[in-house]
Image: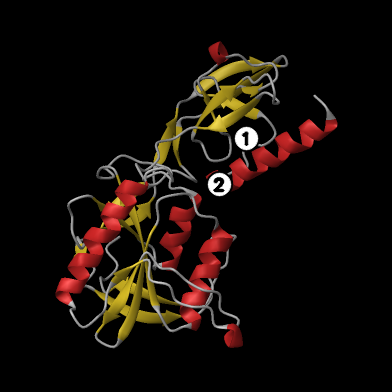
Amino acid sequence: MALDDEHSDSDERQRDAEEVGCYGLFRGIAKNLYTHEKWDARSAYKANGPFYCPTCFSDAVLRKCAQKMDHFAHRARLSPVLGPKEKKLHDACTSEICELMQAHFPEGKWAVERLIPENKAHGIKALVPDISGRVGTTRVAIEVQVSALTIPRIVQRTTDYAKRGIALVWIVPLHEPLGDFPFRPRLYERYLHSIFFGRTYYWWAGRGLTVTPVHYGPASRHIEYREWIEDGAEQSAGGFSLPYKIIKTPIYGADISLHRDFLGENRGSFTPENGRKEIPACRIWRDALPVWW
């Protein structure tokens, strides 16, 4: 592999690790799920698995690639979010929510993709919220997230809305309900979870203004006890359960309505516990539920 290709491959694995939230497979080492022996991706075969990440304990898959360095990748169930090519579903979601908000707040002038012009004097770029209007005297913007928006773009939008005094809420539309089994939230889902006091708001077709707040609770895997010989020495491991670091159990709050159960709130900047991405000072449209986890 050429040097430039190696750098490109390393950069891609760096991005993947950032998205997943774990660097445990970055150096190409995983463990066998049953024997706990370490395997290098360059010398391992699928028959030597199944594998798991020694850092976050989630399943790992071996990838042998002609154009890339052999490597392991994290594998876990993801939420059934809409993709960037599913504009019709996105538009149906925004139209349904906008029409219902207008029905509940006829003086609110609710609109889809309304242009909010640039404010050069205050250094604020033009904004085009998916849905916007007023609830009483409170200006509200609803962003319907359907693709893996980068954290810098979320930060920029959140900051720009705050500068205008607009209360912002992000909702994540799904093809189907999230379900009860553990899953790996994407990077942007985890970031929204931090912004909104430990919950992410999910929506799916036909729910009108109803969203489901979900907290990401702990999940664990049992590490079976095994003994083996490695480099002529006896080795042993396992016999206990360990919490996953990137896989979470969805913990549901009560279903709530965007028109009835939300309020505007200013919050200062902070860095989430065990987080690497600072949350900027912002104005959010958040639920009034007590903590349920």
Apparent side of residue 88 relative to residue 118 in the rendered image (left or right): left
Which amino acid lies under the numbered mark 2 shown in the image of this protein? Glu
Vertically, is 251 above or below 112? Answer: above
Crowding near the residue tagged with mark 2, few <14, some 14–19, many ≥20 C-alpha atoms within 10 Å: some
Marked residue nearer the N-terminal end (2 or 1):
2
Q: Do residues under tags 2 and 1 come within 8 Å of each other at their CB atoms?
A: no
Apparent side of residue 171 relative to residue 155 in the rendered image (left or right): left
Point out the image quarter for the N terminus: top right
Q: Quadrant of residue 134?
A: bottom left
Observer-nearest residue: 184 or 53? 184
Extreme-top residue of the structure: 47
Q: Which mark is residue 19?
A: 2
Extreme-left residue of the structure: 103
Residue 21 at least partly seen: no
Which amino acid lies under the numbered mark 1 shown in the image of this protein? Leu
Observer-nearest residue: 214 or 241? 214
Q: Quadrant of residue 131?
A: bottom left
Q: Which mark is residue 25?
A: 1
The spot of residue 72 in percent (x, y) is: 60, 28
Observer-nearest residue: 141 or 196? 141
Point out the image quarter for the C terminus: bottom left
